[in-house]
Image (cartoon, grey):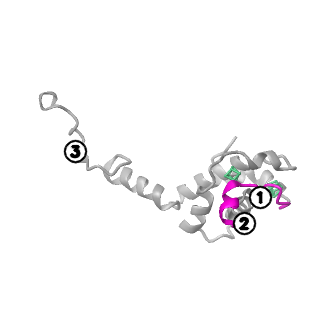
Amino acid sequence: MPHNKLSEHSDDVYSCMRCGFCIKCPLYEINGWASNTARGRIQMARGVLENKLELSNYIAERAFSCTTCDFCVLFCPSGIHTTDIIKTLKYELAKRVYGPSSINRILENIVREGNPYGEPKSNRGSWLRDEDK
Ligand code: SF4
Ligand code: SF4
């Protein structure tokens, strides 16, 4: 189960022996980037935990590209629930306002207009019929 803080996953993060059995991630199949594997994302989580990783939207793009499909969980000999760590990593990054541009746009829309679509607040009642206004 994902937690609110990466520190609560530290036992699992430090149990990763970087064996690479989890590099069967479908995203890794697409572009071959080590950061697109559960192992890569767990090393990111470790970097965040130890304050050794300079956070950026680029890092967040790698973390958020995980679809949390759970496929990698099937292959981990250490029994690490990789997706729980990755979900918490996403949460920690989002709290620090790092995320993929698509999600950042949604957050900005909610803050600015109070809805995820960026529709102006002034149009809020536009769907009502004139007689309902
Ligand atoms: S399979 Fe498990 S122990 Fe091995 S690298 Fe992946 S997460 Fe770490
Ligand atoms: S849960 Fe994420 S890291 Fe694991 S196989 Fe699916 S997309 Fe890849």
Picture coordinates of residue 39 (x, y %)? 76, 59
Neighbourhood count class around disc 1 (C-alpha, 10 Å): few under 14, some 14–19, many 20 upward: many
Task: Name the kind of residue labelled 1 in the image.
Answer: Ile
Q: Tell me the quadrant of the picture where the N terminus can be found.
A: top right
At a point 64% along the width and 50% down the height, the residue shown is: 88
Residue 23's disc is: 1
Q: Is residue 111 left or right of residue 20?
A: left
Q: Which amino acid is tagged 3?
A: Asn
What is the x, y in percent for residue 119? 29, 49
Residues marked 3 and 1 touching at CB (< 8 Å): no
Marks 2 and 1 in Cβ contact (< 8 Å): yes
Q: Residues within 10 Å of mark 2 (few under 14, many from 20)?
A: some
> Mark 3 to mark 2: distance in Å?
45 Å
Nearest to the eye among marks 3 and 2: give it: 2
Quarter of the image for residue 96 reads bottom right
Question: At numbered mark 2, what does the secondary structure look like: helix, strand or loop?
Answer: helix
- Give the magenta part as a residue range: 18-33
* 10 Å crowding of disc 3: few (<14), some (14-19), many (20+): few
> Is label 1 within 8 A of ligand 1 (CB to nearest ligand atom)?
yes
Residue 33 seen by the camera: yes
- 65 vs 12, nearest the viewer: 65
